[in-house]
Image (cartoon, rainbow, N blue to C red):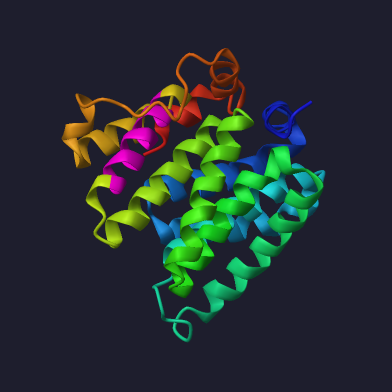
Amino acid sequence: MSFERQLAQRRGRTDDRVLGTGYERCRRASLRETTGPAVEASLNAQRLLWTSTPFFESAEASFYGALSRAACCSVGSPDRDREHLEALTAHHKLLVTWAENCPENFEHRSALVGAEVARIDGRELDAERPYEAAIRSARENNVVHIEALANELAARFYAARGFQTIWHAYLQNAHYCYRRWGADAKVRQLEQLYPQIRTEGIDLRCDRDDPDTSRASRSGDRDQGVRSRIG
């Protein structure tokens, strides 16, 4: 059984509800780009890890915690962001270890966090391949919400560098994958920020004809209420 499916099944258990709320808040805050609440939710989730069977929730807390920390960091400001960088590094090491042992579940997560680490370090060329690796791995393993997130973060990366054509392609892919996942509020957020993506063509990196990907978009997170509130 895949990590995503096991995680989805565990969310309904009584002993996991408190912790589940913690990392769901972390994930929602990360996707909304509200970095302060995302970091706070990540810390709360980590404090509660002892209350449940730890691995599944720990993995998600590390992933979204890492992205929350990365979003708080400024490029080339290691002294000011030291606390965030230390936490980000710790999360990334865990994800790398898990990816080595179970690449189908963690390669995309590890690669995406690795890309963010390189971006923050100012190693732009070193960030390019991990962003694409995260997208490719998520697509190959039918984890459409991670593919959406990786495309969005890659779009921001290229936008900051002034590469408008590349930014636009990744943004279109992010919009399409979020829509397939069912994150309606996130789709609306992107459409409000970038109205042109409502009508323009979509790059088919997120393969709309792949039945396995369609199944993954349903199984990656079975709580439609959570998805519809993201944004």
In this rendering, does residue 25 appear at all?
no
- Residue 185 belongs to the span the image colors magenta: no
Q: Is residue 142 left or right of residue 28?
A: right
- Residue 167 belongs to the span the image colors magenta: yes
Residue 20: image x %, image y %?
Answer: 64, 41
When asked about the image quadrant of residue 193, the answer is top left
Q: Quadrant of the N terminus?
A: top right
Residue 68: image x %, image y %?
Answer: 49, 58
What span is colored magenta in the figure? 166-179
State whether the magenta stretch is mostly helix, strand or loop. helix
Q: Residue furthest bottom?
A: 79
Looking at the image, residue 208 lies above or below residue 114: above
Q: Quadrant of the C terminus?
A: top left
Q: Number of marks in the image? A: 0
Q: Is residue 94 left or right of residue 167?
A: right
Looking at the image, residue 156 lies above or below residue 182: below
- The front one of 75 and 136 is 136
Residue 21: image x %, image y %?
Answer: 59, 42
Q: Is residue 65 left or right of residue 74?
A: right
Residue 147: image x %, image y %?
Answer: 50, 37
Looking at the image, residue 81 lies above or below residue 109: below
- Residue drawn where x is 53% and y is 66% of the image: 117
In this rendering, does residue 13 appear at all?
yes
- Residue drawn where x is 30% and y is 47% of the image: 166
- Residue drawn where x is 58% and y is 36% of the image: 138
- Residue drawn where x is 38% and y is 54% of the image: 34
